[in-house]
Amino acid sequence: MLDIAGRSATRSCSSAPPTSTALRRNWPPGNQDSTSPPIAGSSIRSKRRIYRRLDLTFDHFGRSSSPQNHALTQHFFHRLEERGFIEERVLEQVFSPEDGRFLPDRYIIGTCPHCRFDRARGDQCENCTRPLDPVDLVEPRSALSGSTKLEIRPTRHLFLRQSALVGELEDWIDGRSGWPALVTSIARKWLDEGLQDRCITRDLAWGVPVPKLGYEGKVFYVWFDAPIAYIAATKEWAEVDPERRDWRAWWWAPTDVEYLQFLGKDNVPFHAVSFPCTLIGSGEPWKTVDVIKGVNWLTYEGGKFSTSQRRGVFLDLALELLPADYWRWWLASNAPEGSDTDFNFERFATDVNHDLADTFGNLVNRTLKFLATRYGGIVPGGGTPAAPEKRLTDVLAQRLISLCTGHDDRLFRKAADEVRSIWRLANGYLAAEAPWASFHKDPERTAVVIRTAVNLLDVAATVAWAFIPAAAEQVLGALGRAGSAPAWPNSAVAALAEIGSGRRVGLPPPLFAKLPHEWVKENRRRFAGSA
Ligand SMILES: [Zn+2]
């Protein structure tokens, strides 16, 4: 997996923003303070640390500020210019003599004409969320120096002529399949509303310089160069081991590459419309995305997460509260795929208590404890599987097919539902066959049941591995299956016969603690925010 740690984005000239308020509210993207410089090295390191702690791994963790991305972005610009897709336009823009520079919309603050909020930004009022233009602001001033001596001056910018690429873009979108309805509808909305040309330059102190006479001091708009960094990051990755890694094989007319992007819905337009325009407009055979997996919002206790108001639990603190598995499970099993998902501590505690402690944790505990106390931890031999095991195998086979489909279709809720169903299936089997009741009167039958249960636990942990790797590995380790990334159980019959008699099995400590009501109350208070 490649990840690009991007910069925050700012908008300084009209660049065909989406017209609906819902979309425009998220334009430009990036939740950072726009007056801050690019994400500093320490912040990149802290992001990497958080991903690491979440048990996410990357083949390479790239940055859009890399020299590779500078070169590639300038290459795309030259190609687009040669092919007539770049146009220069003169815009009226706010200039601050005191700052000695043009100010992007977000760098101009003033009083909102609608709600009188006195710190509204030139692109949007944070208080009433209405989109604004800098000229709407009452008593506008520079966010940098506070200067009120602002002037409107003409300045030149470059536009990507997306309107000239509409036909090709439409054909491209028509040729995609497997996109979530959310993504297709966002892409279509942009086309239906008439795709406008996009300003791709900015007056900013950081970013990729525009290689054109008269554009000294200007850089490319972050959403022009950030997606190009996917390609540039592969180049970075390949340069580590050029003998064995060929970045072009992944991007230049490949025939065996499946390309997926995972995004929040605010970033969909840049990946479904803008970036494809760049690639198609270049006239070169670059690989374009096959599937964009876009998701809706995760909200917090019925409202927005807010870093500035410290409202909501963010990953760094979340991982201090509980190990990664709790969060991974909840976030995947509640992924905002069909609609927004609201996180609240009550619901979180109820879900993880039920799924992780009562269902999976209990399955591990009751199976392995019984084996430890009754058989000294050695899987017993004897007996022959009967009708209950046949039924179990049939149901498990269906579940595994359905689970596989969920993963293949990148429907994570569905996949998590199936994993939960397999845990329940295993608990149901144990409850129905009750080996503790038959232990003395029918040892052969009990041996079959406990042997089957141990194998079922092996399957239950294997399918859980993608969601809760730490707990799954503990269970698999206890079952004598060392190493990570367990092999996928392709056949239910084979999977239930994997562990034979005589195998010594350990007893892991309790995997998940139940979250009490006090914990919910305390954290709800702690993360309620200052507003
Ligand atoms: Zn307002």
Image: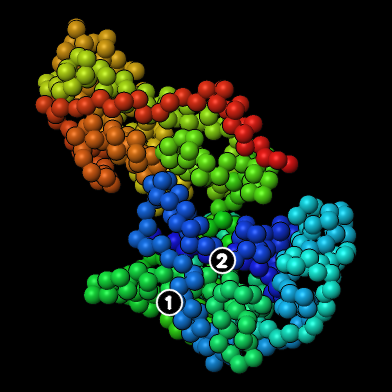
> Is residue 230 toward the left or the right of residue 106 in the image?
left
Q: Residue 225 in the image: state x and y as whole percent.
A: 54, 74
Classify mark 1 as within 8 Å of ligand 1 or not, answering yes or no.
no
Earlier sequence position, callout 2 versus callout 1: 2
- Of residue 29 and residue 254, the one placed in the foreground of this image is 29
Q: Residue 399 in the image: state x and y as whole percent.
A: 36, 38
Q: In percent of the image, x 56 and y 81: which residue is there?
A: 209
- Of residue 283 and residue 331, the one placed in the foreground of this image is 331
| Residue behind mark 2 | 38
Q: Secondary structure at mark 2?
A: loop
**Which quadrant of the view contains residue 303?**
top right
Give the amino acid type for the residue marked by disc 1 in the picture: Gln
Residue 205 versus residue 349 in the image, above or below: below
Q: In percent of the image, x 58 and y 73: which residue is there?
A: 206
Residue 84 seen anywhere in this rendered image of the structure: yes
Classify mark 2 as within 8 Å of ligand 1 or not, answering yes or no.
no
| Crowd around label 2: few <14 · some 14–19 · many ≥20 (10 Å) | some
> Is residue 288 toward the left or the right of residue 238 in the image?
right
Quadrant including the N terminus: bottom left
- Of residue 102 and residue 14, the one placed in the foreground of this image is 102
Q: Which mark is residue 254?
A: none
Residue 495 versus residue 117 in the image, above or below: above
- Of residue 354 and residue 166, the one placed in the foreground of this image is 354
Residue furthest out toward the top: 441
> Is residue 11 toward the left or the right of residue 355 in the image?
right
**Which quadrant of the view contains residue 479?**
top left
Give the amino acid type for the residue marked by disc 2 in the picture: Pro
Residue 180 versus residue 203 in the image, above or below: above
Q: Residue 372 in the image: state x and y as whole percent.
A: 21, 19
| Residue behind mark 1 | 68
Quadrant including the C terminus: top right
Q: Residue 293 in the image: state x and y as whole percent.
A: 50, 57
